[in-house]
Amino acid sequence: MSKRYRTGVIAVVAILIAMQLLGSGGFPQSWNIGLSEPINSWQSWIRTNRDQHWLFTFILNPITWTVEQGLNFTESFIGWLPWFVPPVVVFAIIAKRKKWIMASFAAFAVIYPGLVGVWQESIETISLMAVSVGICVLLGVPIGVWTALNKRAESILRPLLDAMQTVPATVYLIPIVLLFGIGKVPAAIATVVYALPPMIRLTSLGVQQVPRSAIEAGQMFGATKRQILARIQLPLAVPSIVAGINQTVMMALGIVVIATLVGAGGLGQEINQTVRQLSPGRGLVVSLAVVAVAFVLDRVSMALISQPGTSSVKTSRKLLVTSLVAVVLATLIGRLAGWHEFPISYGTSFADPIDTAVNWFRDTFSFATRPFNDFIVRDVLLRAQKLLNNSLSWQMIVVAAMALSYVVAGWKMAVTTAVGILVIGLTGRWADSVDTLTQTLTAVVLSMLIALPVGVWLGRRPRAEAALSPLLDSLQTIPPLIYAIPFVMIFTVGPVPGVVAAVVYAIPPGIRLTSLGIRQVNTESIEAATTFGATDRQVLWGVRIPLAMPSIILAINQMVMMVLAMAIIAVYLLLAALYESWILPLNVLLAVTFAVLGALLLMHFRGRALDVYAQIGKNSWRPQYVAYSEMLGPSDFKRHVMAARVIVAHAGMGTILSALQLQKPLLVMPRRGALGETRNDHQADTAAELCDIEGIDVAIDESELLSKLGKIDHSKPSGSISSHAEESLTNSIREFIHRQMIS
């Protein structure tokens, strides 16, 4: 630990102690600025001027009308189709990949909502989905292409997209409701805003990853930039774009169900009613309908992606035309026969048996559920709330949050954190925020205790991972609202079902990312440790886990974000069950919003530090979570170095000189001759000469590299060089050449 680092830690600890001793308990209520009254006034102004102010007449109202017409047309068209046409089309799309069992199951999933009596509600949900995803594609693809071709635009939009992807879905509903009121249109607009970022990101990534050789080949044949974009970059980026559509579909479905709180209707409204009525059987039946819709949309969108190694039937133009004609004829026959509505006689209900089973479970296992509920509420949540509200001063909490934010993301995040926490206090929602934060922290800790050990175990056992992979896939396709339903039925309303649902919701990505990190540890490191006599436990704790730490940190980050989203949804469910109307009061929405923002800032786990661009060289390995190029040209290399906050590289003099010239922090890990990476240890000798330069760190091996990645000094190198040679050197070369010419 450096002297400067020790001094900083001591100073922070001293300030925290002083804040605790001199500060007061909870945030002063007298500082409440009364934000709800101005917002209510703004809402009244919007209602009064909705039909006459230019903002509505020329901008918002045309948007509302356009989206409304799209929703009405889509819903009418889907409702016009005979009920048997959608399952047939879904079966054909998936069966094209020769996945007959999957295709049959998906076709059954299409008709499941009709079998349980929510056919019309599912049409409303799918219509809202179709319009929202369509708008996302129309906006996301051009913006993604623009950011891929314009680095300045990318640098401007990247922080905005990061913020949009970290804010829980429910928060988007608040400003949308203020501007557009309630109904299906604001629900669609909120869905677009929430689901748009992955469409932009994956489109941009697809265009950026087009091989440079393909672009250069087009340039050699005289193609213009527009022709290269239309005929080379976009066609090669199609798989990434379709993957973006898949992600957009799943994110849209997650918020569409929640959007029933603002009048979206559909399956979400049906679920909300079952929660308010505490009807476990009906709730589960409708929840499975949502799961069925999610499964179908996920499988269909994935079936459209051209994946290497997957088998598919080669579709000729004749077969395609024949299929379309058959669908049209079936549609016309179905309409003439009056088969457009799902037959009520086909429906069934198994809600009553589920109600019986739930009541039996509650009575039988109350000896376990009640103590668990009491323990979480009394011994965990209430004590944590008391600690944050009464025992710790709010001044110390602000300083501690700023210090944490500074360590993980720099002074900008520290200032943002302080502002966010102060806004929470000034709006009079300190206690509400503490409530949400304690639930979030509890769920995060429980998720880590489960997901990380299981992920490590699966990473070391491929067969077990292959067996559990379908279950994890299924869990990740379920919208977050659905997770809360069974636990609300078991524990009734309250904080415990929200905590448990958040844990179950966050576990799958935590397991997957942890397992991925364990599996990607290079075998050479493991073999080297085994050669030196290390046991399996020593290899695990000394090699596998340290080298997998970036993936583990990413897993924790994802679990935090998912727990936050579920925590807010659980609050909505509780309030929706208590209020007569499913439209929540504005002050409650504000409380939830500020709680989310405060917790989000406090739990920001190096999200920006994972924004990586890599030059990987020519090999078969391909990173999954970072942008990369095999080889960068001189201009591209300099551009990426100029844009970088930190450079991590081998001890090549070209990279070192570039870092010194541009004054960029540098972390160096030299290639080693003992591993056959170089003919000798000249890079190690070079790195040894850099140890004393401030702003340049040296890591000898992978373990030290991972350790220093978490403690990178963002200060600029103390040494610097010019981009041009020194005048004395050029004069010496000039004189030498002159003498040679004379002689």
Image (cartoon, rainbow, N blue to C red):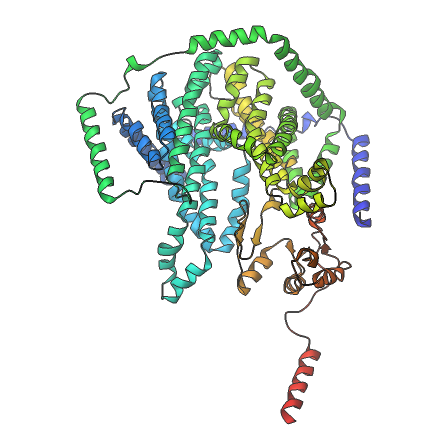
If the image is split into quadrants, where does the C terminus sit? bottom right
x, y (%) of residue 638? 57, 62
Left or right position of 523 against 175: right
x, y (%) of residue 588? 55, 24
For this rendering, which residue is in front, 281 or 317? 317
In the rendered image, is residue 494 in sight? yes
x, y (%) of residue 713? 71, 51
For this rendering, which residue is in front, 451 or 178? 451
User: Which of the 4 quarters of the picture holds residue 220?
Assistant: bottom left
The vertical placement of 153 against 71, above or below, is below
User: Which of the 4 quarters of the picture holds residue 660?
Assistant: bottom right
For this rendering, which residue is in front, 468 or 524? 524
Say which residue appears at 75% left-offset and 29% top-offset.
393
x, y (%) of residue 637? 56, 61
Say which residue appears at 48% left-offset and 15% top-offset.
275
For this rendering, which residue is in front, 537 or 706? 537
In the rendered image, is residue 598 in sight? no
Left or right position of 463 against 72: right
Count of numbered badges drawn on the protein: 0
Say which residue appears at 40% left-offset and 64% top-offset.
219
User: Which of the 4 quarters of the picture holds residue 451?
Assistant: top right
The vertical placement of 736 against 360, above or below, is below
